[in-house]
Each structure stands twice: as structure tokens, then as C-alpha cells.
Amino acid sequence: MNAFQMGSYCKLCESRILDEVGLDGKDIICDFVNIDILFNYYGLRKSRRVFEAYLNDEQMEQILDYASSLDDMAVNRNNILWMLRSWDKNRLMEYTNVSNSFIGKEELMEYIRCEFQSRNLINRGYRWIREAAREMFFRIKHFSRIMLVKEILREIPGTKPTSKDRPFLIKRNYEKYRDIPERKRTADDWKKHVYYGIRYYTRNKNSGPVKICYQIEESFKAMTDIVKAASRLTPEEFVSLFPADKEYNGEKYMEKDYFTTMKAVKRFPEGKPIGNGINCFLEEYYNRDVFLFWVNYFSCMGDYDVHCGISDPVENYFRQMERFHASAGNTI
């Protein structure tokens, strides 16, 4: 707003945004260090009706166009870095030896140089030490402000650790059991990894207007690990974690219900791990958390194909389903 000589209205505009739109922690966030509100393109669109009280349509369009170009630039750069990360050294060297005939080679060479540096162990260690030192310096410099923010967050409804269903507790427990090495996990650790993982990805969907390949890949790998962990459980153990929802009118509406779920569960041997039939098991299971997790997982596979050009996850899924049904004497 300072660029349009409207700086004197900034504080008033911020107060209206906090009251009428609010902070969502994603598109509109608070910078507690500089005491400022930060927006991306979609946050500006959400707050547009507030900004239009102080800026005319032409000024607002200029701001939105600029923010959109910054978002597009960030997405493109992240996708390029993700692509380079998947290449081996020989393929990267091929691009360093091509001619200077195409536009943007200097920028691409900079990306490739950064990729080579990220694969160097010495450089990786240096960057880790540098980031740790920066974080420590920041914590020391802004210690009083950090403590103030913690006190503020304790007073915000929904953040106090009074229930195991609190979102931040689910996230913390999921990360705790996810980070335990497989060889050190007990049977109880596998169960808790599945329980908290499904609950976490029920609430943290891979949705939003911006799709970045490395985020899609990260979510897909994490959810795939949860599915693999679930395949180690027996049907009885899984049912104890996520009981089938007590709805009985599925036949009337031609959809899943308690009876179809129990029928699907009985197809798997008692007391034995679900194994390769986990995809079929989860697809036919009727529980709200499991259903939302499975929708999110399948959506992530589709994003992998559409936004990253990699169709392997979707194809592997249907191959596994086909093999399971064939081994069970059924057809898809």
C-alpha cells in the first residue's frame, strides 16, 4: 500500500483483515518477528474486498498480477529443481556441454551447479552447520519474542494439549513413530504409525491451487509408507484401530456400509498380515478416517501423473489390484 501512497491506512487495513478474514496459516500468515501480515496470491484474493476499500480496481489488479507472477516463478523453479534431483550425474553433465543456442541456459547452468553442490557431502555438511548456527542466533536474538508468541498460542482455542485428537498432537505423534527406524519398531510402534498417519493425512490433504512436484512426491512417499505399515497388521488389528462405521443402509443406496465392510474383512485370513491385499482392503473398508485418507492418497497419485508427468504410481496401484483379485479368483 505504500507504493500507492496509502501507507497511513496499513494498520487499519491489517485490523480489518484480522477481524473479517483471519489468519489461515497458509495463504495469510503472521510474521511475529517483524509484526507484519504476509500474503501470497491466494491470500490477497481472499482479502480483496478489504483492500478494495483503500485501493482502486486498477491498483488491486497490479498487485494481484505481480503476486501471481511470483507464485508462478516459485512453482516453476521448484519443479525444475525437483526434475534435476531425479537425474543422474551423466545426464546432468550432458546439459552442461550443450551449445549456447537456447534461451535461459545461464539460469539452467546455475540450477545444475546448485544440484551438484547439494550432492557434495562437504557442502551439505557446511550448509547444515550454517543453518543450525542461523537458527541458534535467531533464537538467542529473539528469545523474548518467541516466548511471547508461545504464551499467545497457549491462549488460542484449540491449541491446548487436552485431547489426543488435537491436530498438533496427531502431527507430533505421527512424526514420532514415523521417524523410528523400521528395524527398531515394535508391533505397537507399527500400529501407532498407521493410526496417527491415517489421522494426520485425513486432516492434512494434498489439496490447494498450487501443486509443486517435490511436495507431491513427499506426501506420496509418506502415505505409501503408511499403507505399507498397514499391510503388516492383521485384519483384526486394523479393525481395532478403525472400527467400521455403524451404518447399515448401504444396500439401499448402492454404497459401502458396515455389512459390506465385514464381508470384505472376512476375505482375509484371520491372524495373518493383510499383505499384498492392502489396497483392496482399504478401498472396501468403510470408516470415515480411512475413507478420507484413501481419497487423499489416490488424489496424490493423480497429481503425480498430471503435474509431474509420472504415471507409475497409478499404474502400479491397478496392477496390484489386478494381481490380488486374480489370486483371489475374482476379476475387476
Image (cartoon, rainbow, N blue to C red):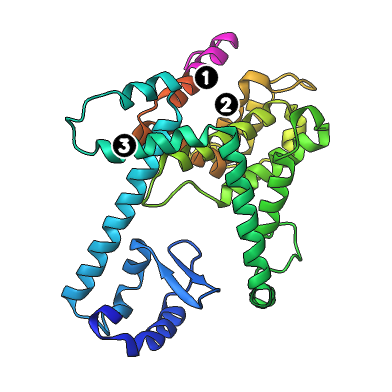
Q: Cα distance, mark 3 to mark 1?
A: 41 Å
| Residue drawn at the location 80% of the way across and 22% of the way down | 271
Which element is circle 1 on?
helix
Q: Quadrant of residue 250?
A: top right
Residue 1 to residue 76: above or below: below
In magenta, the rendered stretch is 319-332
The percent coordinates of residue 62 (x first, y second) are 20, 68
Q: Earlier in the sequence, mark 2 or mark 3?
A: 3
The percent coordinates of residue 96 (x first, y second) are 33, 27
Most prominent secondary structure in the magenta stretch?
helix
Which element is circle 2 on?
helix
- The mark lying in front, picked from 3 and 1, is 3
Q: Three-letter amino acid code at disc 3?
A: Leu
Task: Check contact, mark 2 vs mark 1: CB within 8 A.
Answer: yes
Q: Cα distance, mark 2 to mark 1?
A: 7 Å
Q: Earlier in the sequence, mark 3 or mark 1?
A: 3
Q: Which residue is mark 3?
A: 108
Give the numbered dot on residue 79: none
Q: Three-letter amino acid code at disc 2?
A: Asn
Residue 303 visible in image: no
Q: Which residue is mark 2?
A: 279
Residue 321 on the magenta segment: yes
